[in-house]
Amino acid sequence: MTEYPYGQRDLFAEPETYFFAKCHQRDYLAAWRASRDRFLASLVARARQQSAICASCQPALPGSFALAERISVAFEELRLGTMDAADFASAIEPFVVKYEVFKRLFEHYSADGKRDPRSLPASLATYVLFAQCLAALAQRTGSLKHLSTLLKLCDALASQSPASFSAADAQTLSNVIETERFLVERLAMQCAA
């Protein structure tokens, strides 16, 4: 079987451009599934561990907002039904664009949406939360744009060691990958019909 081409290196350290994606092999989808299955098995094992790695977080920066807090609040509003999917999509859109263009996010942004120059790169915990938001949005709306970003983000997350995630984040990411698989399988069935 062909090896999934986007699981061979750390995609946060060395981002993938996906320009002319290497998806022409006949068994590309099977290779993607096998790659995600291996990572998922490792994540599930990590999620079962009782000791969690504490995610380091940069202290609050005056004059900026924390990305994790901003998207967490919006995600909770979506979950509770106090924000609809369209407003949620608008709330996270600047970060979808930033991830698509730069292949990275940062912990803090200024009020005008620009990266705070004092900020550290986003933590894995922030990326897991962002993936959870993308998965929920793609599932609720059927948005291929958000599914595409989710696939790229999951490639980057799957390029990390499962030991890099806290047990809670490993569990959340396991759920995200299950949702990602469902959405891809559903799309494959729609294309085959």
Image (tube, helix red, strand yellow):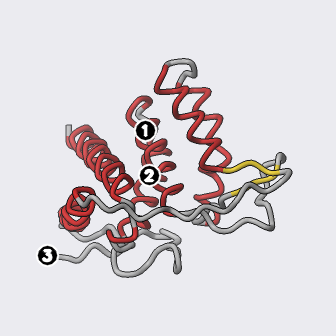
At x 48%, y 44%, the residue is 146
Residue 1, numbered label: 3
- For residue 74, side relative to residue 112 (left or right): left
Mark 1 or 2, nearer chain start = 1
Residue 57 image-quadrant placement: bottom right
**Quadrant location of the C terminus?**
top left
Look at label 3 and name its amino acid.
Met
Tell me whether the residue at label 3 lies in contact with that at label 2, contact meaning CB atoms closer than 8 angstroms: no
User: What SS does tag 1 mark?
Assistant: helix
User: What SS does tag 2 mark?
Assistant: helix
Mark 3 or 1, nearer chain start = 3
Residue 150, numbered label: 2
Q: Which residue is mark 1?
A: 138
137 up-or-down from 159: above or below: above
At x 73%, y 65%, the residue is 119
Residue 47, numbered label: none
At x 68%, y 68%, the residue is 120
Could you give the CA–CA distance between mark 3 and mark 2, rounded to whole angstroms? 24 Å
Q: Give coordinates of residue 106: x percent, y percent.
A: 66, 61
